[in-house]
């Protein structure tokens, strides 16, 4: 029987504290030739066989953020996560907070993305032009599931 392959993904929903507006850290997708190229997404990625959601989150953040600071933060601060089926993927969503000083120390890995961008909570609304398709689906869930 045919069917969609179900896979698992860990994503970090990272709120940056300290600015007058609530802001969230997003990655500018590097995916040449894809409709997702240059669109924004939450950091994270697919789980490898045998990994836990947290292990995936630590590995993905180590790949996407060049200093290693973000993967250290997730190791120390990740507690709970929400689980949601989005399309054919089970998403493990980890809410995290970092300070502006911690954000200032981050550096994207150029092989993984075109950089990071802060998005205000007000601008965190579904937009096919701005966000990847699955990120749009996650944004629709945020108000209902994630509390900081």
Image (tube, rainbow, N blue to C red):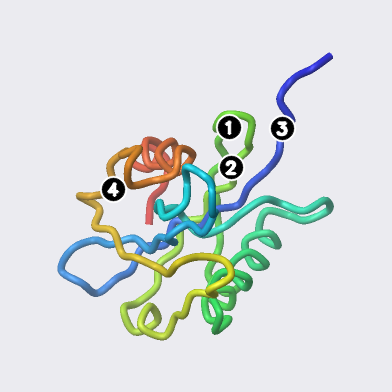
Label 1 Cα crowd, 10 Å radius (few <14 / some 14-19 / many 20+): some
Between label 2 and label 3, give the one nearer the viewer. Answer: 3
Task: Give the quarter of the figure containing the N terminus.
Answer: top right
The one nearer the camera, 105 or 15, is: 105
Going from the N terminus, do you reach mark 3 or mark 4 first? 3
Q: Tell whether 4 sits left or right of 131.
A: right
Residue 22 pos. (x, y %): 24, 61
Which residue: 63% across, 70% down?
63
Residue 113 pos. (x, y %): 50, 65
Secondary structure at badge 3 equals loop
Query: Pointer 3 and pointer 4: residues touching (CB < 8 Å)?
Result: no
Residue 64 pos. (x, y %): 56, 69
Secondary structure at badge 1 equals strand
Question: Pointer 3: what residue?
Answer: 6
Query: Pointer 1 and pointer 2: residues touching (CB < 8 Å)?
Result: yes
Question: Pointer 1: what residue?
Answer: 85
Question: Pointer 2: what residue?
Answer: 91
Mark 1 and mark 4: Cα distance apart in space:
20 Å
Going from the N terminus, do you reach mark 1 or mark 3 first? 3
Q: Quadrant of residue 117?
A: bottom left
Task: Give the quarter of the figure containing the C terminus.
Answer: bottom left
Q: Tell whether 50 sits left or right of 34.
A: right
Secondary structure at badge 2 equals strand
Q: Residue furthest left?
A: 20
Between label 1 and label 4, give the one nearer the viewer. Answer: 4
Residue 79 pos. (x, y %): 56, 60
Which residue: 33% across, 68% down?
16
Going from the N terminus, do you reach mark 2 or mark 3 first? 3
The one nearer the camera, 123 or 33, is: 33
Question: Pointer 4: what residue?
Answer: 124
Going from the N terminus, do you reach mark 1 or mark 2 first? 1
């Amino acid at each position: 029987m045919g069917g969609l392959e179900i896979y698992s993904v860990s994503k970090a929903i990272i709120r940056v504290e300290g600015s007058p507006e609530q802001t969230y850290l997003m990655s500018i997708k590097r995916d040449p030739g894809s409709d997702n190229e240059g669109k924004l997404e939450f950091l994270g990625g697919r789980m490898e066989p045998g990994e836990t959601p947290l292990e995936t989150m630590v590995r993905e953040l180590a790949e996407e953020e060049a200093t290693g600071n973000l993967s250290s933060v997730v190791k120390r601060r990740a507690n709970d996560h929400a689980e949601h089926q989005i399309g054919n993927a089970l998403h493990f969503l980890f809410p995290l907070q970092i300070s502006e000083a911690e954000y200032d120390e981050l550096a994207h890995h150029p092989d993984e993305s075109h950089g990071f961008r802060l998005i205000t909570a007000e601008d965190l609304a579904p937009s096919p032009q701005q966000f990847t398709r699955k990120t749009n689906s996650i944004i629709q869930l945020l108000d209902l599931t994630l509390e900081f």
